[in-house]
Image: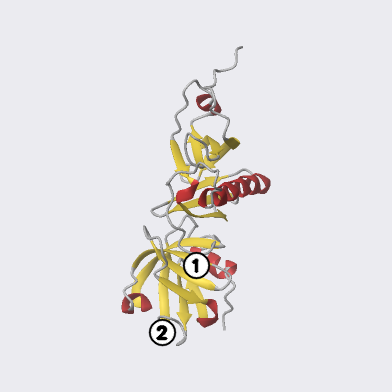
Amino acid sequence: MESPAVCDGCEDDVHRSGYLRKHKSMHRRYFVLRGVSERGPARLEYYESEKKFRGKAPVPKRAVALETCFNINKRADAKNKHMIVLYTRAESFAVAAESEAEQDDWYQALVELQCRSKNPTDSGVAGDYGVPNPGPAFKEVWQVKVWPKGLGQAKNLVGIYRLCLTDKTVNFVKLNSDAAAVVLQLMNVRRCGHSENFFFVEVGRSAVTGPGEFWMQSADVSATSSGGKQSGGAHFLERSPIITR
């Protein structure tokens, strides 16, 4: 049997390829990670199958330019232990690997290409596809709904935000925004807690917002609590360096 025809140069910029699952549908799709080239920016594409990709004129079902990614994180929830989530300004796109080793390989390749895309060399061919990075590289990102209660209401910070964690700060970045609306120093956090998929962060007088609490609800791909599943709030508390006192 003859091999399917492959378009000239279609694989010159491919850094990694293979089958992963889309998080929401759990459909198995063929993913291709491309580096920067004359044909476009570094991006993650997916096709219905490897056969579709290796066809004469392959057209991806979707492509996510890595320059536009707000952040890229490894994640786990009740359905998938080995997820990778790509956050853009307006949405998140999650894929699931079959094993931790496969997750690590894809994650490292994605982050490396993302860094190159945001900091191209003088000889690079990256185009103007990106948006400003809203701050330092974030260790964790959760999408949350800030409720009209406490500081959320007092400071008019109600709505959908990305809660972004670094070693020293908690950043509230509004959906479709490039910059943090509020940056809280972890040293100003007095305590935090959760109840099901609701959780709060209480800050003291030294915080830029003044004293009070932010009440939030998980709005991310993480599972809410039931039957022993971990909530977005519980996951935040577990992964953050905040010490409850």
Instruction: Look at the image and tell me whether residue 55 can be seen.
Output: yes
Q: Residue at x 51, y 41 (%)?
A: 125
**Disc 2 residue type?**
Gly
In primary-sequence order, the first of circles 2 and 1 is 2
Give the side of residue 100 with respect to residue 6, left or right.
right
**Disc 1 residue type?**
Gly
Q: Residue at x 48, y 31 (%)?
A: 48
| Percent position of residue 212, x then y | 41, 83
| Percent position of residue 152, x then y | 36, 75
Give the labeled residue for mark 2.
210
Give the labeled residue for mark 1.
233
| Percent position of residue 66, x then y | 50, 47
Image quarter for residue 78? bottom right
Residue ranking furthest to the bottom:
205
- Find numbered disc 2 in the image and state the secondary structure of the residue it sits on: loop
Instruction: Look at the image and tell me whether residue 93 can be seen.
Output: no
